[in-house]
Amino acid sequence: MQDSIWFQTLPSSQRRILEQSDALPRTAGVAIVGAGLIGISTAYYLVEAGVKDICVVDQGTALGEASGANAGGLWFAQQSVELGPVSPLAAASSRLYDELSCCFDFDCERPGLIELLEAEEDPRTQARIDATRSAGFEVEKLSGRSARSLEPGLGVTPPAALFYPNEGCLHPVKLGATLVAHLRSRGVRVCLGAAVRRLRPSLDTSSGLVTAETVVIATGAWTPQVTRSLGWAPPIKPLRGTLLALEPMSKTLHHTLVSSKYYYWQLASGHVAGGGSVDDLGFERGVATPTVAAIRDEMAQLMPATAHRPLACSWSGFRPFSEDLLPVIGPVPHQKKVFVAAGHFKKGVMLAPVTGKIMADLVTSGRSELPIEPLSPSRFGAKDIGSQAS
């Protein structure tokens, strides 16, 4: 389990929910490997579709890796350009989060996002604005003065900025704990501390065997290791990201703030947090002191009120980076009733609901109404086995 600000601000009752493990069943209609937000969301939408006999299996605790180590960002518009032809997934996920926030409490807020630009005039900026609007999202270019007026605590006047009014953030671990509790009330078993050693014909785990009719693999950066026994391993690898949070303070940051290096936000608890480094270090855990210092330096420059605030914690997580920058969602090649949802990189929390919905649709009907063809696992053939996750 991560030592992130999310777990530090999580009520003890919800922490126990994430640490509690159900007994591993011998059989299951659907076995989901991975108890991060994507795996848990898949279970949620399967239950909503009327599927019974579901178990979720994880080698650690629920939300214990990347899902508990991120920024909780709902940056659908700001990230839509990177998604390109599959930006409809971002729009659909935004709507699903609106629905979830009506049913559950997970500190979901939509105050907007300010992205600081390095030049007042840049043809790429207008192209980005056009692409964002074409994808159905709102964005507005601001002068530096307007950006400071919108965010009074800003300590610099940027040449210009982009404002995305509908972006937001959430408490991902509160969401995970809430969904796990809901799923258990509907008969879903969440089995922890069970590392999957081999897939098919049964799930061979460190806690025993599970025979499942359908398997969904949602194991993030560990996906190539899990699928290797199937003769297929997508080119997904871990990229370590570092974040930090300061001790609680009065309202300092009214929007998510994005610079060319890092991003910053303020939790409902008052903690100002930020970071977002990208380090290609394999599965090397830890936090590098120079990285923390660099984040703190920029945070103090952008928000002078944070300069002398004590550090509450710093942490890192393994983002699942896909070789072509797109998630891997769909049936595993040459396998019956085995599906994968991985490689979301920095968009895992943002796309968790829509990915879970897509997985539920594929399991129950074999199709999705969303444009997932570019995300097909078949774009990576058997030749990719062993290319990652040694």
Image (tube, rainbow, N blue to C red):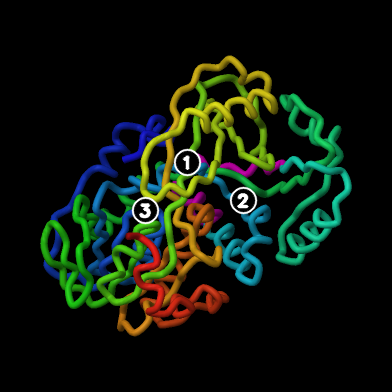
Give the spatial CA distance, label 2 vs label 1. 14 Å
* Rendering coords of residue 302 (x, y %): 69, 28
Q: Which amino acid lies under the numbered mark 3 shown in the image of this protein?
A: Gly
Give the mark, 3 or 1, whose residue is nearer the N terminus: 3
Crowd around label 2: few <14 · some 14–19 · many ≥20 (10 Å): many
Residues shaded magenta: 97-114
Q: Which amino acid lies under the numbered mark 2 shown in the image of this protein?
A: Trp
* Rendering coords of residue 52 (x, y %): 26, 69
Which residue occupies 87% across, 43% down?
120
| Residue identifier under label 2 | 75
Which residue occupies 62% across, 64% down?
83
Give the spatial CA distance, label 3 vs label 1. 14 Å
* Rendering coords of residue 271 (x, y %): 52, 27
Q: Secondary structure at mark 2?
A: loop
Residues at marks 2 and 1 touching, judged by CB atoms closer than 8 Å: no
Crowd around label 1: few <14 · some 14–19 · many ≥20 (10 Å): many
Viewport quadrant of the C terminus:
bottom left
- Name the quadrant containing residue 128: bottom right
- 115 lies left or right of 288: right
Q: Is residue 231 above or below residue 313?
A: below
- Name the quadrant containing residue 146: top right
- 27 lies left or right of 355: left
| Residue identifier under label 1 | 171
Question: Residue 36 shows which numbered tag?
Answer: 3
Viewport quadrant of the N terminus:
top left
